[in-house]
Amino acid sequence: MVHPLAFGSDQDHSLRIIDLSANNITILPPLLLRNLQNLRSFNIRDNRLSLFDFDQLLGDNDYLRRNFERLDFGGRMNPVISPKDLRG
C-alpha cells in the first residue's frame, strides 16, 4: 500500500511524473493525487491492485483531470479497466 500522505508535502506539488511500476502495490488510497497540480504521468504498471478508481485518486481536482496526459496501468496483475472508468 502507498501511504495516503506519500505525496502531501509542499515539494511534491511540482511532481510531473510518478513511476510506481513493479512494486507489488495492492492498494492506492483515495485522494492520493488530488494535490499534485503539475502531475502529467502516473505509472502503476505491473502491480497487484485489486481495484482501481481513477476518480477517487484525483478527488475533485478538475484541473489535474483536464491536464493529465498519461496513465500506465498495464501488466498481468492489475485488474482490467475500460476507458469509461477513467472519464469521471
Image (spheres, helix red, strand yellow):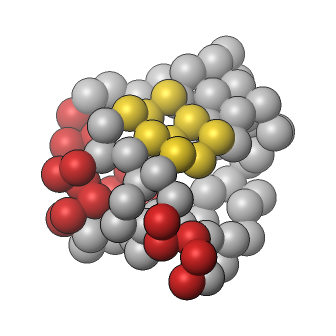
Q: Residue at x 22, y 34 (%)?
A: 84
Residue 44 % position (x, y): 61, 37
Q: Is residue 36 above or below residue 25?
A: below
- Residue at x 26%, y 28% (from the top left corner): 83
Give residue 47's quadrant in the image.
Answer: top right
Residue farthest to the right, as pictured: 24
* Residue 36 x/y as whole percent: 43, 67
Q: Residue at x 56, y 21 (%)?
A: 74
For this view, does 64 lie left or right of residue 19?
left
Q: Is residue 27 visible?
A: yes
Q: Along the horizontal axis of the image, is 3 left or right of 64? A: right
Q: Is residue 56 shown to the viewer in this render?
A: no
Q: How many marks?
A: 0
Q: Nearer the viewer, residue 84 or 13?
A: 13
Residue 15 versus residue 71 in the image, above or below: below
Image position of 61 with respect to 22: above or below: below
Q: Position of residue 33 (x, y in %)?
A: 47, 64
- Quadrant containing the N terminus in the rendered view: bottom right
Instruction: Determine whether 14 is above or below 87 in the image.
Output: below
Residue at x-position 20% and y-position 43%: 87
Place of residue 10 in the rendered image (x, y in percent of width and height, measured from the top left): 55, 83
Question: Which of the 4 image quarters holds residue 77?
Answer: top right
